[in-house]
């Protein structure tokens, strides 16, 4: 088709298939828009708001915004990046993010976004919440300190694994991740290493045990290229890697 | 350019590990260039015990006891520009991992109720600064002008930042130089 | 777990039967299940998992979202003081602490013996007769030291709520000024008959010409909404009445549901006729639990009068009935898509829009969702005709509006005016003197000060859901704003980052200023947060959470500045206080064990 | 206790004495201060080195997954992070039941010698050379690395480049110069590529040569100021260090050797995984740093000295030729007097730097560095002890891990802590020799610091603990079964 519809993103013309969101179309075309709760294999969710863009003077989350012909989308502009910077700072201040001793460091999307947006400090007063680990499972560790409540594990577990191992509880600033067991312990759920839910955490909450720091500095995902140069890796695709298919 | 008066820099480590100071030294030969542009006031590298009027203050480590607070205030009073260097100064760092524990409980467990501890006591000599109930990043106690993240920030990051600053530019790091680990 | 041996099976089965064992009724099921033990027992959840075929985590997720539901014991008597600014102005906090002392319990905690817990809750909609409280969900108004004393006694003696003095629970209408709504002489069915004469197809059209706009605050043209719903492809359509009157300072829906319930249901029914819906819901906020039985009775009467059910008024194929769902303490459920989520038994999290409820609402089916007052006005408009209706009010705001007046005035209560009334007129009618400011339409609304009292209520100038809180010159507008900020932080659903974290940061900053640690730097942080909340938030709650501060800052900056330290930075905590624990542990009090108030 | 009065630890009547403080002690790593109490005649009654900070690592590491420990705990110290990184890894090797592959062990050793090189260079050139080259009471404004750069540019440059090379070895093996991740439980996460090896090989000969010159500088200092260097803060002390099976110096692994101040062996080739049978710790109210002592000698007499001076003097030989030659000269110098001198530390340190350079040269030519077999594991244990000879001395890491892989107990005895009492002895000796009865000047006070610096204390390391961790001693029988538990209260009373 030579007459595929397009919209404008920061001056560039972006083709899209009907039904695609601004985010999906942009990534497919290799244009990066910051995101945390968006995942190429899942239904858009729109909670992290990192993907906020400006369209006709109004702001909206690009991951849930349907692409339309002729849209004029502004993403990589000072005003929007300042907003994103503050959002990243908020997430760092909300949880307990100690990158220096975190095994996800270098492969962490939150960290990579901080780098990309030149976030030098959380700025806000840190909340230092008390979030105990769940190490009950023989092969899997949950470190809730790093949870950014993106719900990807929740969606992966229910939509792909068909298990509902994870869910959100509480409200507002007390919102937190829980697991599907009376004991509240992961060991008493039916999660398995091969589950999709094991693969989607953008930060360091859901971890395969005893892997730790096996990838040397320099070879981690965001050591080589900034996250903003990895747009295509997040282009929409069919759910894969689920052991149930 | 070299005619102009040298900038005066003071550095200190509060609740830090000196890794950030090591990273300053990791600029290697460039230290010789740096020394043509700046002179050092109070620093672990000099025997000046108290900070005088300075252009730039560089602080490593977070705030974990009363003495840290005094030193931080001394720096803020004397330094035109105050830089928080490294994770501990910026977030409290690993020492802040004690923040979800009650200090009293810790001290009690360690000194008084540990099994078999017959006549426990908590060190209480007036020469010892008291610990704060929580470890705080610098920006929660005084105004901080710049932050250089990393544990420690790489020598290249520090070099870029300082040379930008000395040249009167707004310091920028960019990919590869800005790290949190 | 084997259902036979589950001690909770008996009462749960009764509840489950009533709700057709449907997971979409989860919230209702949990609410009733809680009435058994005062909390939702873990073993009860075992049983529900099996019967409803949903994961435990979902049940816990839903239960923990609503502040009236508990997964752990929370006391035989659960006392919640309404914490709207108007309650505070009437001394609610002092009363709470008095009761806490009387019953030896810390605010927010359960007493050692499990007898009682005492805390606060967002505005319970009794601002005209506060201070108010909820005891095990039952409303008690007009609290005084003596009344609180008595309640303390009753609790200590474990007297069942049923045996408490009836006067405690009496709620007054306080109708002060009537207009076409409150004065209506319609008999049940009158509006419906008019509608049937008009013809199904013409109802939405008539509403459109009447110029009726939603009374929930947003003011969307009601006719357009009904039309869109009727034109939606799916023929399973629904009518939902939003009676989650959570906006602090608003209580007019309470009065309508108390004294004009028939008109509300009449409006819903003709909406059903207009859009072709078979099922209707009234989503009643949990704080109005005491209205449930009376409303059920009204519904029953209407069924018997053939005003609900099959072939309404003998009109073949006009089938419609209404169920009442109760909320459980979540302001966000006043947002239409969150309300629908809640109706479906989920956490009350606002949906992504588009699509909108008119096409994808309840169960993703077309849904006409309107405010209590809107349905009443619709009934009136249909009955009196579009032309005569639009003659009332102003060009863009037709008809009348109920105003909930509270705060510093001798005659708080409900006032009905044609749209276009000025703030000053309302103040005069309620007898307010030395008024410093009026908060229009609640915390998310607008704060107007003396020089703006000639502004008019209406969508052209001051849009309002009806709240009208009066503050005289003895009031500290900073504390007003701080109360509102706490409200938003407590009610944020937590879905999106800016609102979840931002409202907490705002709260932190306001408290910092209140504690005397505030600086200009903090005010600029507030402005930054405001921008982030407004541009980044998922729904209106976050987008308006900063309004109280911005408006009070605009009009009453001195109230903030008198609290600010002169210097441009100050720690958010007391440095010397941070050493207290260590001093206590070491028994030291020498100079070195203190941090003098050094200034940076 | 009259004893403690004449050893200047605790004044009899502090109330009517004048307090002088050196705060902070500078040109050392970490946070410490010295206080002196003097009477109206400037006679000194009390001298104490206080460690004034704690950070609580042993506490908050509880509950963390064990594989985080090597990366987390190294944050105790930015000067010798590799030592902690490796000590923790060695402890965790035990926990995962691993026996290292040759590649893993050699990469770790390379990392460790890089650490030795950079730390010793840093200490000698950046921190101490100002005292040694300008004089202890020289102009305070010049008495720092900046002054050295001005006065001795070549020496300064040499110091900078020696340290740089050590840091580069660390970067290549650990991924980062400070706080890397190279060593993991059961092995390492990378080998050394051919390119990396060649990059390091290109300068190694220069580094060895400069290290030899450094030994020469240290020797010359002794020759030029024999009396001062022999006697300054001199005191006799017991010693503790690791040695290889054959008695050779081995900074990465070995058995514990302890000798008393007269050179009699207290124990030798002792298996450190039961260190708690021979080392106890004491606490004093005026310091957050512990006071370890040899169990057999008790808290009063059992304190000892660790670090370069002990290692060089107590090993039977150094297994690299140049360093061994240097050791022999050192031991023979002036009838062996340097071997017991506090300032002998500097000379010994340079000998170790030379040894490290030689070791690096040897390792770089070993093809095992390019091996790809990096990690192993075996039968899981619940307890692990790792001991290593860090730049400043013996470093002990001890972890207990539960079945969920969470650390439930952690005890760390760091090098500087072993030297706690020794440093206090050193400064008290200097106080007697140089300060007692004299009007105190900045220069005189710096003598105290010179004595402290000789030990190269890493006070950051020493202040890791949330105060003292009461020591729980477990007597294990041959097969590791628990026999009885002996505990020591803070004032040294033992109870069953």
Image (cartoon, helix red, strand yellow):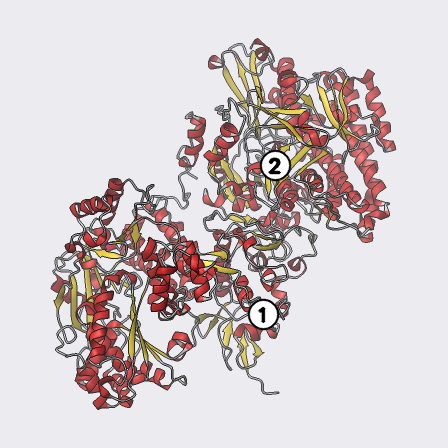
Q: Residue at x 28, y 87 (%)?
A: C205
Q: Residues within 10 Å of mark 2 (few under 14, many from 20)?
A: many
Position of residue C312 in the picture relative to residue D313 (left or right): left
User: Disc 1 on helix, strand or loop?
Assistant: loop
Position of residue C295 in the picture relative to residue D407 (left or right): left
In whole angstroms, how far apart are the C-alphas of marks 1 and 2?
Answer: 43 Å
Q: Nearer the viewer, residue A243 or A20?
A: A243
Q: Residues within 10 Å of mark 1 (few under 14, many from 20)?
A: some
The answer to which quarter of the image holds residue D95 is: top right
The answer to whether any part of residue C60 appears in the image is no
Q: Image quadrant for the C terminus of chain C?
A: top left
Q: Chain of mark 1?
A: A
From the viewer's perspective, is the residue at label 1 or at label 2 nearer? 2
Q: Is residue D274 above or below residue C480?
A: above
The answer to which quarter of the image holds residue D94 is: top right
Q: How many marks?
A: 2
User: Disc 2 on helix, strand or loop?
Assistant: strand
Residue A40's label in the rendered image is 1
Q: Nearer the viewer, residue C101 or C92?
A: C101
The answer to which quarter of the image holds residue C71 is: bottom left
- Residue picked out by circle 2: D410
Q: Residue A150: x percent and y percent? A: 51, 61
Q: Residue D343: x percent and y percent? A: 72, 22
The answer to whether any part of residue D35 appears in the image is yes
Q: Is residue C553 above or below residue A2?
A: above
Q: Residue C92: x percent and y percent? A: 23, 49
Position of residue B54 in the picture relative to residue D263 (left or right): left
- Residue at the front extreme, as displayed: C4
Q: Residue at x 85, y 41 (%)?
A: D362
Q: Residue C64: x percent and y percent? A: 40, 57
Position of residue C205 in the picture relative to residue D8 (left or right): left
Q: Nearer the viewer, residue D113 or D338?
A: D113
């Amino acid at each position: 088709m030579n007459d595929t519809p397009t919209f404008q993103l920061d001056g560039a013309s972006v083709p899209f298939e009907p039904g695609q969101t601004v985010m999906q179309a942009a990534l497919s075309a290799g244009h990066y828009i910051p995101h945390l709760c968006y995942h190429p294999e899942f239904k858009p969710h729109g909670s992290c708001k990192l993907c906020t863009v400006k369209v006709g003077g109004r702001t909206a989350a690009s991951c849930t915004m349907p692409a339309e012909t002729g849209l004029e989308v502004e993403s990589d502009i000072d005003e929007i990046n300042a907003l994103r910077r503050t959002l990243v700072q908020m997430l760092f201040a909300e949880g307990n993010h100690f990158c220096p001793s975190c095994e996800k460091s270098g492969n962490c999307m939150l960290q990579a976004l901080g780098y990309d947006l030149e976030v030098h400090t959380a700025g806000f007063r840190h909340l230092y919440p008390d979030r105990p680990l769940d190490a009950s499972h023989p092969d899997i560790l949950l470190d809730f300190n790093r949870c950014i409540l993106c719900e990807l594990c929740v969606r992966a577990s229910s939509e792909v694994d068909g298990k509902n191992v994870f869910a959100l509880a509480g409200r507002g600033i007390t919102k937190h991740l829980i697991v599907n067991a009376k004991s509240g312990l992961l060991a008493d759920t039916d999660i398995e290493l091969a589950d999709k839910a094991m693969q989607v955490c953008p930060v360091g909450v859901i971890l395969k045990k005893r892997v730790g720091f096996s990838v040397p500095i320099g070879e981690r995902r965001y050591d080589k290229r900034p996250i903003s140069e990895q747009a295509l890796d997040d282009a929409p695709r069919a759910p894969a890697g689920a052991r149930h298919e | 350019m070299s005619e102009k008066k040298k900038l005066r820099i003071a550095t200190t480590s509060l609740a830090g590990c000196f890794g950030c100071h090591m990273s300053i030294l990791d600029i290697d030969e460039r230290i010789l260039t740096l020394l043509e542009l700046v002179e050092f006031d109070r620093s672990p590298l000099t025997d000046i015990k108290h900070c005088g009027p300075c252009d730039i203050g560089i602080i490593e480590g977070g705030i974990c006891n009363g003495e840290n607070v005094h030193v931080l205030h001394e720096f803020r009073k004397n330094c035109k520009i105050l830089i928080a260097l490294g994770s501990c100064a910026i977030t409290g760092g690993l020492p802040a991992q004690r923040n979800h524990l009650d200090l009293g409980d810790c001290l009690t467990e360690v000194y008084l109720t540990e099994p078999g501890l017959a006549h426990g006591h908590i060190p209480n000599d007036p020469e010892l600064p008291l610990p704060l109930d929580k470890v705080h990043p610098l920006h929660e106690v005084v105004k901080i002008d710049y932050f250089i993240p990393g544990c420690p920030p790489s020598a290249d990051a520090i070099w870029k930042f300082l040379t930008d600053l000395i040249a009167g530019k707004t310091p920028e790091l960019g990919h590869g130089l800005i790290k949190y680990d | 777990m084997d259902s036979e041996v589950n001690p909770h099976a008996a009462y749960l089965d009764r509840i489950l039967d009533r709700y057709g064992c449907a997971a979409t009724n989860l919230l209702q099921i949990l609410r009733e299940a809680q009435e058994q033990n005062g909390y939702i027992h873990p073993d009860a959840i075992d049983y529900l998992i099996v019967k409803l075929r949903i994961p435990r985590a979902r049940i816990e997720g839903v239960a923990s979202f609503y502040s009236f539901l508990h997964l752990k014991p929370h006391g035989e008597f659960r006392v919640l003081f309404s914490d709207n600014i108007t309650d505070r102005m009437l001394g609610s906090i002092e009363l709470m602490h008095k009761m806490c002392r009387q019953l030896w319990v810390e605010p927010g905690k359960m007493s050692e013996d499990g007898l009682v817990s005492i805390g606060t809750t967002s505005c319970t909609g009794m601002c005209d007769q506060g201070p108010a409280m909820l005891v095990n969900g039952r409303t008690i108004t007009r609290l005084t030291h003596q009344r609180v004393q008595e309640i303390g006694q009753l609790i200590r003696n474990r007297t069942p709520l049923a045996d408490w003095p009836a006067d405690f629970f009496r709620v007054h209408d306080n109708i002060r000024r009537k207009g076409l709504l409150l004065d209506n002489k319609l008999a049940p069915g009158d509006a419906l008959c008019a509608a049937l004469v008009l013809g199904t197809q013409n109802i939405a059209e008539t509403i459109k010409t009447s110029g009726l706009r939603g009374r929930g605050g947003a003011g969307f043209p009601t006719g357009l909404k009904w039309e869109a719903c009727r034109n939606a492809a799916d023929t399973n359509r629904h009518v939902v009445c939003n009676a989650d009157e959570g906006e602090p300072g608003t209580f007019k829906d309470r009065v309508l549901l108390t004294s004009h319930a028939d008109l509300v249901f009449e409006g819903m029914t003709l909406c059903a006729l207009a859009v072709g819906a078979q099922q209707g819901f009234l989503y009643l906020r949990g704080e109005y639990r005491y209205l449930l039985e009376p409303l059920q009775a009204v519904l029953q009467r209407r069924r018997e009068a053939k005003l609900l059910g099959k072939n309404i008024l003998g009109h073949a194929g006009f089938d419609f009935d209404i169920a009442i769902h109760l909320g459980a303490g979540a302001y966000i459920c006043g947002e239409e898509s969150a309300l629908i989520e809640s109706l479906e038994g989920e956490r009350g999290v606002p949906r992504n829009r588009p699509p909108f409820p008119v096409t994808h609402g309840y169960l993703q089916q077309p849904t006409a969702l309107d405010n209590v007052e809107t349905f009443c006005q619709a009934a009136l408009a249909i009955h009196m005709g579009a032309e005569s209706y639009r003659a009332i009010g102003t060009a863009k705001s037709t008809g009348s509006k109920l105003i909930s007046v509270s705060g510093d005035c001798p005659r708080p209560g409900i006032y009905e005016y044609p749209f276009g009334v000025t703030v000053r007129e309302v103040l005069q009618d309620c007898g307010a003197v030395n008024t410093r400011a009026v908060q229009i339409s609640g915390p998310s609304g607008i704060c107007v000060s003396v020089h703006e009292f000639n502004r008019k209520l209406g969508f052209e100038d001051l849009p309002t859901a009806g709240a009208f809180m009066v503050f005289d010159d003895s009031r500290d507008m900073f504390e007003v704003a701080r109360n509102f900020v706490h409200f938003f932080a407590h009610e944020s659903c937590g879905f999106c980052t800016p609102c979840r974290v931002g409202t907490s940061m705002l709260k932190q900053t306001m408290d910092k200023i209140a504690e005397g640690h505030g600086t200009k730097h903090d005010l600029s942080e507030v402005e930054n947060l405001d921008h982030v909340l407004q541009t980044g938030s998922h729904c209106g709650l976050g987008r308006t959470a900063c309004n109280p501060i911005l408006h009070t800052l605009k009009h009453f900056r001195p109230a903030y500045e008198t609290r600010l330290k002169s210097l441009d930075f100050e720690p958010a905590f007391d440095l010397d206080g941070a050493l207290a624990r260590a001093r206590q542990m070491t028994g030291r009090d020498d100079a070195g064990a203190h941090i003098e108030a050094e200034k940076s | 206790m009259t004893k403690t009065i004449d050893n200047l630890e605790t004044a009899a009547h502090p109330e009517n004495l004048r307090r002088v403080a050196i705060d902070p002690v500078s040109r050392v790593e970490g946070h410490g201060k010295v206080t002196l109490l003097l009477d109206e005649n400037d006679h000194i009654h009390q001298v104490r080195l206080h460690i004034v900070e704690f950070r609580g690592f042993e506490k908050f590491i509880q509950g963390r997954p064990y594989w985080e420990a090597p990366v987390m705990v190294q944050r105790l110290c930015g000067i010798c992070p590799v030592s902690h990184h490796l000590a923790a890894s060695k402890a965790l090797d035990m926990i995962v039941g691993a026996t290292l592959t040759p590649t893993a062990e050699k990469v770790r050793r390379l990392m460790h010698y890089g650490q030795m090189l950079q730390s010793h260079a840093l200490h000698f050139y950046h921190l101490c050379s100002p005292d040694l080259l300008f004089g202890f009471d020289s102009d305070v404004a010049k008495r720092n690395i900046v002054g050295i750069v001005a006065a001795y540019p070549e020496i300064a440059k040499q110091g900078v480049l020696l340290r740089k090379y050590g840091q580069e070895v660390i970067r290549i093996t650990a991924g980062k110069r400070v706080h890397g991740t190279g060593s993991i439980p059961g092995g390492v996460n990378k080998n050394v590529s051919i390119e990396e090896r060649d990059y390091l090989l290109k300068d190694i000969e220069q580094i060895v040569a400069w290290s030899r010159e450094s030994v020469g500088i240290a020797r010359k200092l002794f020759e030029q100021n024999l009396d001062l260097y022999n006697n300054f803060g001199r005191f006799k002390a017991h010693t503790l260090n690791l040695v290889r099976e054959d008695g050779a110096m081995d900074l990465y692994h070995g058995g514990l050797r302890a000798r008393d101040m007269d050179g009699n062996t207290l124990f030798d080739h002792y298996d450190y995984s039961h260190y708690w049978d021979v080392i106890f710790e004491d606490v004093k109210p005026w310091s957050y740093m512990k006071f370890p002592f040899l169990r057999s000698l008790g808290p009063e007499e059992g304190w000892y000295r660790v670090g370069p001076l002990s290692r060089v003097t107590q090993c039977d030989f150094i297994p690299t030729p140049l360093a061994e030659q240097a050791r022999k000269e050192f031991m023979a110098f002036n009838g062996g007097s340097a071997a017991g001198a506090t300032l002998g530390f500097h000379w010994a340190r340079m000998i170790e730097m030379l040894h490290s350079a030689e070791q690096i040269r040897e390792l770089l030519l070993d093809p095992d560095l390019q091996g790809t077999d990096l990690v192993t594991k075996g039968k899981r244990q619940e307890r692990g002890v790792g001991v290593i000879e860090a730049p400043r001395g013996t470093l002990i890491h001890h972890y207990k891990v539960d079945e969920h892989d969470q650390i439930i107990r952690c005890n760390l005895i760091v090098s500087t802590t072993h030297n706690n009492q020794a440093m206090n002895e050193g400064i008290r000796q200097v106080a007697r020799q140089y300060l007692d009865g004299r009007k105190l000047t900045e220069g005189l006070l710096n003598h105290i610091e010179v004595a402290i610096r000789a030990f190269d204390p890493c006070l950051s390391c020493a202040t890791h603990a949330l105060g003292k961790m009461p020591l729980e001693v477990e007597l294990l029988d041959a097969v590791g079964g628990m026999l009885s538990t002996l505990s020591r209260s803070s004032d040294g009373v033992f109870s069953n």
